[in-house]
Amino acid sequence: MRTSIKLTMPIPLLHLAIFFSLLFSGIHLGCVSLIFAAFLHLYLTPPILFRLHNFFIPLPLGYSEFTFSKYSPWFGSFQLQVIYIAIPHLEAVLRLIPGAYSAWLRLWGAKIGKGVYWTPLVEIIDRPLLDIGDHVVFGHRVTTTSHYILPNKNAPGLRLYMKPIFIGEHAFIGAGVRIGPGVTILPRAFLKYNLECFPDKTYGGKEENGK
């Protein structure tokens, strides 16, 4: 496995180590500023590092080669997000504060409209690749994934496919809906419970099950 890949894998552990170091030092010393710095680091360092990473090494949209023999921009950026997938309560807390989660996603580069409602157990896998209109409602355990990996038939390794998800204003995303890469959900769409939205399909209007 290439050294650049190996270097990205400890990122989640390093992130937590710095957080707990600042937190416990602040508690031990009775220093409120250190405790505050711990939580700033927990929520702000990863999106800031992603924006820098994406400026120099942009995420490859569409199909690209994915192999551990060379550095993958997606894999590197995923390591910055994986802590929030492994510990979903970190994001659930933000969703309890009106507007906080939408603002946080914007730090990652997502386009989030005003008045978007997130239930606490929504799962967002690729935070930067979202384009969401105003007043969208996300039901319980909705999942969005802006990538998938598939076999590479013509060469060793795998292929990665990445594409943003677009959700129009006033759409209602029912509980358990799973949204794949490249999906477009039309304005004012009503997606029923447990619907699976397949990659690059359009959903909404009269075609509730996609077209």
Image (cartoon, rainbow, N blue to C red):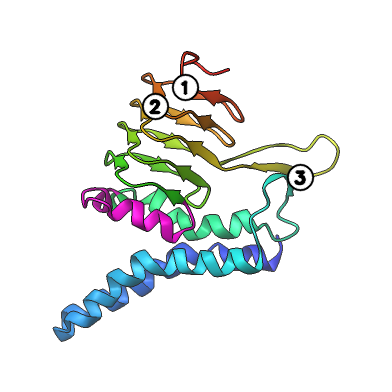
Task: Give the residue displayed 53% in from the left and 18% down from the top.
Answer: 210
In the image as oriented, which residue stretches furthest toward the right? 154
Mark before the other along the chain sequence, 2 or 1: 2
Q: What type is the residue that disc 3 sits on?
A: Gly
Do the CB atoms of the residues marked 3 and 1 lie less than 8 Å apart? Answer: no
Whether the magenta-drawn stretch holds residue 80 is answered as no
In the image as oriented, which residue stretches furthest toward the left? 30
Which residue is denoted by mark 2 in the rendering? 188
> On screen, 46 above or below 18?
above
- Tell me how far mark 3 sits from mark 2, CA to CA: 41 Å
Task: Give the residue displayed 28% in from the left and 50% down from the top.
Answer: 89
Tell which of 186 and 118 is nearer to you: 186
- Report the number of numbered marks: 3
Task: Give the residue displayed 35% in from the left and 36% down from the top.
Answer: 136
Q: Position of residue 196 (x, y in %)?
A: 48, 23
Depth-wise, is mark 3 or mark 2 nearer the camera?
2
Left or right relative to 83: residue 162: right
Do the CB atoms of the residues marked 2 and 1 lie less than 8 Å apart? Answer: yes
Q: Quadrant of the N terminus?
A: bottom right
Q: Quadrant of residue 154?
A: top right
Q: Position of residue 27 (x, y in %)?
A: 17, 78
Which residue is denoted by mark 1 in the rendering? 204
**Secondary element type, mark 2:** loop
Q: Position of residue 115 (x, y in %)?
A: 29, 44
Mark before the other along the chain sequence, 3 or 2: 3
**Secondary element type, mark 1:** loop
- Tell me how far mark 2 sits from mark 1, CA to CA: 7 Å
Which residue is denoted by mark 3 in the rendering? 157
Tell me the number on the disc at residue 106.
Answer: none
Q: Quadrant of residue 58?
A: bottom right
Left or right relative to 71: residue 78: left
Q: What type is the residue that disc 2 sits on?
A: Arg
